[in-house]
Image (spheres, rainbow, N blue to C red):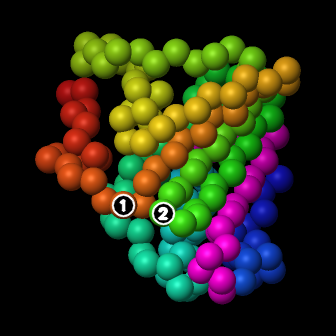
Amino acid sequence: MVITLRKQTADKQGGDEGAPLRYGATWEEGAARAADARQALRALLGHAPRTGRAAVPAALAVDAELAASELVTNAVRHAPGPCGMILQLSGDQLTITVWDSSTEKPAVKKADPRRIGGHGLHLVHTVSDRVVVALRETGKRITAHLSLTPKQSTIGLRGIALPG
């Protein structure tokens, strides 16, 4: 089940810039799509200025979309069953939490330009300030924390070099 962001923000979130903006979605097995995660993130970040917050820098928005997309993709590929995502924008931080039904701790693989696939979690760690994995009896939660304070970047995406 996905609650549209427009409905949620209008019904549950006022214009108090101190209150966190939140969005949550739950998908049945096979229903989650990375594109939905990116769209929800864009909607949340687009709503932020309407609550008195400053607009999120474009480079950070791209990094956040990448993190959300990769986390949801990993949940779909590596965990049977339902999954979900929680986005929260508060203070100077954006958190992206994705939960799934796998109790296996994900491994971050070293970057290897010769390998096809297997780069997602490495990218999430690269664009995030901190990534926390919480294993549970019924699955896991992975939370990417991104600071809203712009960082110096030499080539975009917070300085990462994508495999060619």
Q: Amino acid at mark 2?
A: Asp
Q: Is residue 85 left or right of residue 96?
A: right
Mark 1 or 2, nearer chain start: 2
Q: Return the x and y of residue 136 as percentages of the image width and height.
A: 79, 24
Residue 145 position (above or below residue 3): above
Q: Return the x and y of residue 13 as percentages of the image width and height.
A: 73, 77
Write the start and end of the magenta stretch as one range.
15-34
Question: Along the line of sight, which residue is nearer the eye, 35 or 145?
Answer: 145
Instruction: Look at mark 1 in the image and give the residue it sits on.
Output: 149
Q: Return the x and y of residue 82 as percentages of the image width and height.
A: 80, 35
Q: Return the x and y of residue 87 as percentages of the image width and height.
A: 63, 55
Residue that appears at 63% across and 58% down:
88
Q: Is residue 158 visible?
A: yes
Res. 90 mark: none
Res. 92 mark: 2
Give the image quarter of residue 47: bottom right
| Local secondary structure at mark 2 | loop
Residue that appears at 75% across and 17% down:
103
Residue 36 position (above or below residue 47): above
Q: Is residue 164 left or right of residue 14?
A: left
Verify whether residue 33 appears in magenta. yes
Q: Amino acid at mark 1?
A: Thr
